[in-house]
Image (cartoon, rainbow, N blue to C red):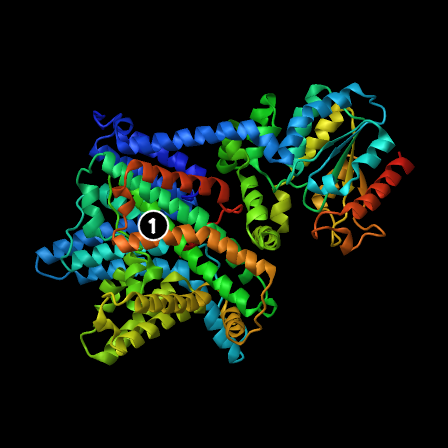
Amino acid sequence: MYTITSNKATGFLWKTREGKVVLFLLLALLLLEIGARSFEERLSADLAHFSELPQAADRLREGSRDGSVLVIGNSLAREGIDTERMREAFGNVEFFHPDGSSVVEWSWGLRRYFLSQGSIPDRILVITARSHLVDHVVAPEKLGAYLVGDENIGSALESLDNHEATARFLLGRVSHLFANRSRVRPLIGYRFLPGFEEAWPLLASAGMEAQLAIEGEEALVSRSLVALPRLVAFAKKSGSELIVVKIPMVADYDLPDDVVEILESNEIRLIDLSDLDGISESSFRDGYHLNREGASITTKALLDALVNTP
Amino acid sequence: MLFNSYTFWIFFAVVALVYRFLDHRGRNHFLLLSSYVFYGYWDWRFLTLIAFSTVVDFVAGRRIARSQASGSLGREWLLASLIANLGLLAVFKYFGFFVSEFNTLLAAFGWEKGLPGVELILPVGISFYTFQTLSYTIDVYQGKTRPAQNPIDFAVYVSFFPQLVAGPIERSSHLLPQVVEPRPKLDEARFREGLYLVMGGLFRKVVIADNMAMIANQIFSRPTEQLSGAEVLIGVYAFAFQIYGDFSGYSSIAQGTAKWLGFDLMDNFRHPYFARSPREFWQRWHISLSTWLRDYLYIPLGGNRKGSWFTYRNLMITMVLGGLWHGAAWTFVIWGAIHGIWLALHRGLGGARGGSRQENRMVDGIKIVVTFHLVCLTWLFFRAENLEQALGMLEVLFAGPWVWNEALTGFLVLMGFFLIPLLVFEIWLERRENLYSLNELGWVSRGAVYLFILLMLLFFGAPERQEFIYFRF
């Protein structure tokens, strides 16, 4: 049998200089957290977008449901789809496009900001490139902070596949400072570091390629088909038509076979804009996002597809 | 369970909390359980290997002592320990490599069939704990340490989780008594030192190593013919700081967490890139391995006692085997061989007699820069995927083309952004000749430094978390 030792050292920390160091750090973090929560909307257009989503949901709900559209995507959709032309064509159109998001964020965000608020569009357009319908690009802290509603915390935690993701989700839930930590590097880099604009995309893409090289396309797909069926189920339950749109990229691409299989088995319409006439390398402002002209061509093609085959 | 993962810190918090309320025997039992959970988290099957190594060396140590008490040497038990430990390494680490090389040789003579290869997963940290247990039986054999009396204590010595998978490789004479005897309480001084080591280690791993890894990986993953000399140079610099941050960061976190549990582990790094000679580099880099190789390989081979040529031979053997310890690949062998040649040359030119005395700042500065670049040259072989890539990059480095572009400016600026705070801090420590100088400052200064580290960890950790490089060894 082990004995329990009396612990005379308990409490030493708070009476010592090292205790002051720890308290100083905690206090500094608390102040930064308060600062982050107070000013986050001013610091990032993306966070401002999150704060505007309740109003967008209200507009969607209060407008006519007939022909209403919710466009979901990320920065590819934000820059690749012409908002004004969409509004001219459909009237009641809203957008949900957090930066760096993919189907995981879309499914929970759709549920939290729109469906659970009774804001149910006629059609949901999901704008994707090759890998955005598989859920490997997960930022659990962002899910915790902004995308999962209180009623879905349990399901969201169950869907995370490891302890790391769970810890990050929970940290994001309690700390917006933590949830937004990845925004600071580009914020400082693009403003203050010479050459960052050229270097950072190379470094970021090398990281993703290395991950793909290590894990292989098959591993990527086999572990990442949880969120898409969830998104499909949410849309079906609400009675909205889900339409998947392949956005143009510099190089041609196909969606992973497993993704196509899910779309086909659920009779989800796929609009393929990945190979449009008039789109070339010069249609991209940074090799990834469409420029204004590229967005105009893409939006026209999307409208043609939606209007010609309603 | 990586030190730079949230999972580890949750695990450690639970361990430290429970540990605090147990008596000495209970702590050792609990440490053993925790260490096995820590190791089994990677792959529970490898627990059998560590248990095997523990049992063999515990029995061997006691048998050697018993044999020596009755007048014989107990050499057969030492041999059994050597065969068991080196056998594990041979099977899991080198078998595939030697079979593949042998088959290549056979193919050169037209025999295509070759030997059947076996794909074995390399158990994490096997090179570290086998060297640690080997040192125990050798020390018992040489009468430098007493055999462990309690199997649990010995098992904790072998598997102590903070240093289990990547060192420092602790000697039984240093670590085992700390396991056996009651350990000091976690008082303010111990907490302070632990905090310093953990914060410094996390900074070097998460901020320095992982960010340098992004740059090094971007360059080393590209075909050689697409690279310019400037890119190769930046890639090698980035890798030099990646591996330093990675490994010294790991060692520092190991020391810090051990410190909080009442253990004192050895310093494994002492600002190696401020070394002024190859000899001094190895007195500052991976000290636990370099002293292990010195004591259990170089000196038994004869060291420097049998004249110059034997000394050079011994240096070469030691460094080539040291290279092979890192991995079963020709690039590691060449890495070790270059270090061996370089140490021999330095010795031959009388460098060993000069010791590490300081000269004027200018001369010291030049020596530091030259030594650093020679070390970088060897890192190129260490990091390259294969010999072909290493030679190709070496050719580009020396023969060009040399082209500069904006992305390279960005790489260089990013390197400066991360490395300048580290280097300034290390220069300050180096001048004070005390690795723990920060602990002598007031709490406000420490708080400011830790806040900087915390913010860098929070905002500038690399997006892709990298595994510790030395786990592969």
Above/below status of B253 relative to B103: above
Residue at left 51%, top 29%? A35
Residue at left 29%, top 74%? B346
Give the letter of the chain under mark 1: B
Near-viewer residue (B437 or A167): B437
Q: Quadrant of residue A2?
A: top left
Near-viewer residue (B51 or A189): A189
Is residue B279 something one can see in this rendering?
Answer: yes
- Residue B269: percent from the left, percent from the top? 31, 55
- Residue A32: percent from the left, percent from the top? 47, 31
Q: Quadrant of residue B261?
A: top left
B46 vs B280, left or right, is right
Q: Which residue is mark 1?
A: B251
Q: Quadrant of residue A263?
A: top right
Q: How would you rate the neighbour count of disc 1 (Cα within 10 Å): few for under 14, some for 14-19, many for 20 or more? A: many
Above/below status of A61 relative to B128: above
User: Circle 1 sits in a helix, a strand or a loop, which is it?
Assistant: helix
The quadrant in which the N terminus of chain A is found is: top left
The quadrant in which the C terminus of chain A is found is: top right
A189 vs B97, left or right, is right
Picture mark count:
1
- Residue B298: percent from the left, percent from the top? 25, 68
Above/below status of A140 relative to A195: above
Looking at numbered disc 1 in the image, what kind of residue is underneath it? Answer: Ser
Above/below status of B420 relative to B315: above
Is residue A175 something one can see in this rendering?
Answer: no
